[in-house]
Image: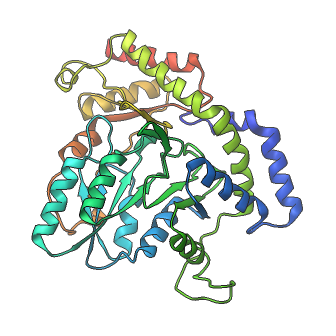
Amino acid sequence: MEFRDLKRQYDFLKEEIDDAIKSVALSGAYINGPAVKELENELAEYVGVKHCISCANGTDALTIASKIWNIGPGDAVFVPDFTFFSSAETIAAEGAVPVFVDVDEYTFNIDCKDLEAKFSRVKAEGKFNPKAIVAVDLFGLPAPWPELKGFAEQNGLLLLEDGAQGFGGAIAVDGEKKRACSFGDISTTSFFPAKPLGCYGDGGAIFTDNEDWAAMANSLKVHGKGSFKYDNVRIGMNSRLDTLQAAILLVKFKAFKERELDFINKAADLYTNLFVEKGLVADCREELGHGKMLMVPQIPQGYLSSWAQYTIRVKDSESRNSLQAFLKSKSIPAMVYYPTGMHAQTAFKGFADYGPCPVCDSLCSTVLSLPVHPYITKEEINSVVDSISEWRA
């Protein structure tokens, strides 16, 4: 069994992907070919924003956003503690200070109450200028954007959506479905192969409604170009999405919209329903602490996840390690995202500390992600659940 079976996906899409690759190879337009602009237009329309600017990877997308906003020394940027390193790395790389915010224990996304508390401490200390919030659509589930938007507007903060794992997710806002990568003043995503929409290498994109920021993103990603590539008006970087990856993404995006997002939500629902049927699900946090019970992912009312991961929780690290080893003995891969919070990363040692993140610390010891992808079979899901039930016994 594969954790995220990209080979099986290729089998389903082989003819179209092979044709797309061949078309680019024959065209000779390997950089900035027509597939790049076509992809950007389709993604912008799907997400519901004016501009999509593709780039080389999701980390570069975050970096470009930081550069557009002139985030740098003296600035404080609020980042969830439970996330992938690049969410905070790109802030620190610009000379700013990432302030780590705890997360909700049920959704794993940024905790607005702790955000308010950390913001108040930074303001009271007066050492750094609160500049922006980076919120992550973790494991495919959009962050609590309505609350975040209100807080950001109230306190003059810029809002950056790290949608690297969230593309395809959505929230019903005032009766209208708004998609992930449309919530931030600038939003970003990643096309790393294992992401909900992934290419066959690295790739990323930036989304915004702001004309000036879109123009600057297009400049920054090509060495700070002005009216043409040898007219350099700012210090930029080399961060283009190549035509081959764009062509592959066009094929995969069609499948994503037509069936894969639906397929993976049905797979996640089947996991949850089977866990409930077998009596494996803890109804409360206290119950999780007794025996080999599980907590399954929580999707708030009105939210849609794109399920980058299906992540359960167990009692403690000993139980997690035991379950992971047991599944491995059954040839079932299970992964830990993430074993270490941002505040505990060696690279951030000595950075400003504005308080603990106890939920993150707990999650790092208790989460385990199970195999999930659009083409996983009912039999495979049943096998995973049966194995966990056997481990519990």
Quarter of the image that includes the C terminus:
top left
Counting from the top left corner in percent of width and height, residue 301 is at: 37, 30
Outermost left residue: 124
Quarter of the image that includes the N terminus:
top right
Left or right of residue 76, residue 263 in this image: right
* 271 in relation to 213, above or below: above
- Residue 181 or residue 166, whichever sits in front: 181
Outermost front residue: 174
Residue pictured at 39% horizontal, 29% vertical:
325
Residue pictured at 26% horizontal, 37% vertical:
105
**Can you see residue 331?**
no
The image quarter in which residue 120 lies: bottom left
Residue pictured at 37% horizontal, 10% vertical:
278
Query: Could you tell me how many numbered marks the image carries?
Result: 0
The image quarter in which residue 287 lies: top left
Counting from the top left corner in percent of width and height, residue 283 is at: 25, 19
The image quarter in which residue 227 lies: bottom right
* 213 in relation to 141, above or below: below
* 171 in relation to 162, above or below: above
Left or right of residue 160, residue 59 in this image: right
Counting from the top left corner in percent of width and height, residue 36 is at: 71, 61
- Residue 167 or residue 237, whichever sits in front: 167
- Residue 59 or residue 300, whichever sits in front: 300
**Can you see residue 210?**
yes
* 180 in relation to 334, above or below: below
Coloring scheme of the render? rainbow
Residue pictured at 35% horizontal, 32% vertical:
300
Counting from the top left corner in percent of width and height, residue 314 is at: 29, 28
